Amino acid sequence: MKKIVAFLIFNSIVLIGFSQNSKTIKVDESRSIECIAIYSDHETESLTQELINKAQIVNEENNGSKYFLDEIPNFLISLNQKFYFGKNISKTLLIYNGDSINFEGIPQIFIKGLHSGDHEFIIKGKDDNDKILNKSKLKFTTIGVTPMFKNDAIVIGCLLLLLSLIFYTSNLKAFAKFYKFVPGLLLCYFLPAILNSLHIISGEYSELYFISSRYLLPASLVLLCLSIDLKEILKLGPKALIMFFAGTVGIVIGGPLSLMIIAYLFPDWLGADAGEVWRGLATVAGSWIGGGANQTAMKEIFETPNSLFSKMIVVDVIVANVWMACLLYGTGINKRINKRLKADDSAIEGLKNKMQKFVSSISRIPTTSDLIIIAGIGITGTGLSHLLSESVTPFFSSIKNSLANYGLTSLASGFFWLIVFATLIGVVLSFTRLKSYEGAGASKMGSLFLYVLVAAIGTHMDLSAIAESPILFAIGGIWMLIHALFLILIAFIIKAPFFFVAVGSQANVGGAASAPVVASAFHPSLAPVGVLLAVMGYAVGTGAAWLCAVLMQNIV
């Protein structure tokens, strides 16, 4: 076993080691990480242990964990004995960010210089003939700053306190003028974002968004669809579909147009990095038209580097969330917007009025029994949705490569089927006697779940991240502006009300998690419209995003 003979200073520790055992992987133009091989023997065992005490050990047992860089800035990849047992491993190959490093023997690998984000290290053990004898994949997430509150029980308490204050003040005369211009739903989203940006809470560390989107969202969809009137929704006409596809077209043309504008304003910058930037923007197009599955498909199709992909995820989240905030603000002034668009919103108002009359006719003071049954309908529907999703997803996952040829990789997503089945269950139940529980507050409980989801979405917005890649955010902002202007132009031509503008846009950009939120801001009975359009976004996402990427590639 090699002896460590050169010096490396780390946190005032002198580590003995060969200089050739320290190798660098370039992450991007400004960042790189250092990988140092450590070989344990009797002479270096105590020193290695001292280093281990200053770093986080990453192995198979804690795979998928999250760490704060201000607490633990360095990491030690230390595979267990099962990886090497019974195998004549003479070389170790480390793969990160598309780059690979070969180390002699069986070292522990010390990593320094990691930045915030998701990381995946692939370790392969090889023999003298370079034959791979074993392979391990380690994933973990690093977060820059430790929040004040890490316990999710405290975080959900903070979020519900904010929601309570918003709804309490919205009923006070002193705040009437304020809420006339600032919708309460916007605050439910924006205030948690401030808490996250100030590092009071951490949406990236918290599991609240996952819980809300996987459990509360399906329950909300079941309860909101419980009183759905399909005939009245169909009477809304083709404008909903027209505005949805207008939103898709706006994103497809917005990508290349935004690149053209930036190329004119910053030709030197774009000239240096254009060959890679369009690949990253392709993944944003996949997300904004379809969803996470479509985004991943674009990453694989156009071979987007992991370092660029991580930046694009931040651009995707921040720009999309800012746009969602604009749409939520628009819901509060949609009457004025409709006048400017000369839009006819009689069909939407008719549906809202009919639902209000229906609810008034069956309204009653809910008993404990009613509330338990309503909760049972939502949660049982969620459980059944998960069961059905888990039953069909493996089949579609097994033919994912074939689906990719038709741009239908979303069918291999468990979340896609979860949303589809939750919606279908709610629609089916709307034809049963359970529909009468709308009078006891079924949609109100569904709206409660949605508001918690909105707050959880807000915790994933970090306003300070904009300063890290201003040019990328400029491209994203111009892109979204083009998307918005195109939607408004089409809405003006066909006299579509702002409801179709907002839901058509969010069904593309936000998907099934946020489209019903925007739709329900107009009225809870309209939430299913957002869901149905969002499902269409999953279907067309990969194909439309591919076209957008090809156009961007030709621009640069």
Image (cartoon, rainbow, N blue to C red):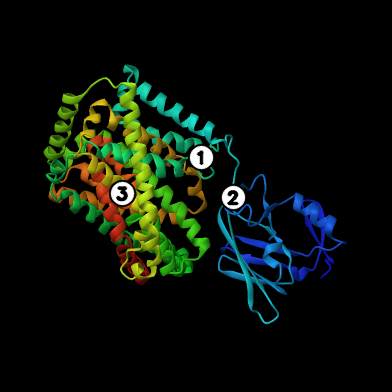
Q: CA distance from mark 2 to mark 3?
A: 31 Å
For disc 3, the neighbor class at 10 Å (few under 14, some 14 to 19, many from 20) is many
Instruction: Name the residue: 45% across, 44% down.
Output: 210
Q: Are marks 1 and 2 in contact (CB under 8 Å)?
A: no
For label 1, the residue is 197
Instruction: Name the residue: 35% across, 53% down.
Output: 416
Image quadrant occupied by the C terminus: bottom left
Given the current orientation, which residue lies at the most extreme right position?
A: 43
Mark 1 or mark 3, earlier in chain: 1
Mark 2 or mark 3, earlier in chain: 2
Residue 344 falls in image quadrant: top left
Q: Give the secondary structure at mark 3.
A: helix
For disc 2, the neighbor class at 10 Å (few under 14, some 14 to 19, many from 20) is few
Residue 491 at what x, y percent from top left?
A: 18, 48
* Residue 384 in sight from this viewpoint: yes
**Above or below 73: residue 181:** above
Q: Amino acid at mark 3?
A: Phe
The numbered dot on residue 65 is 2
Q: Nearer the viewer, mark 2 or mark 3?
A: 3
For label 3, the residue is 421
Residue 388 at what x, y percent from top left?
A: 35, 51
Q: Give the secondary structure at mark 2.
A: loop
Q: Amino acid at mark 2?
A: Ser
Instruction: Name the residue: 16% across, 43% down.
Output: 230
Mark 1 or mark 2, earlier in chain: 2
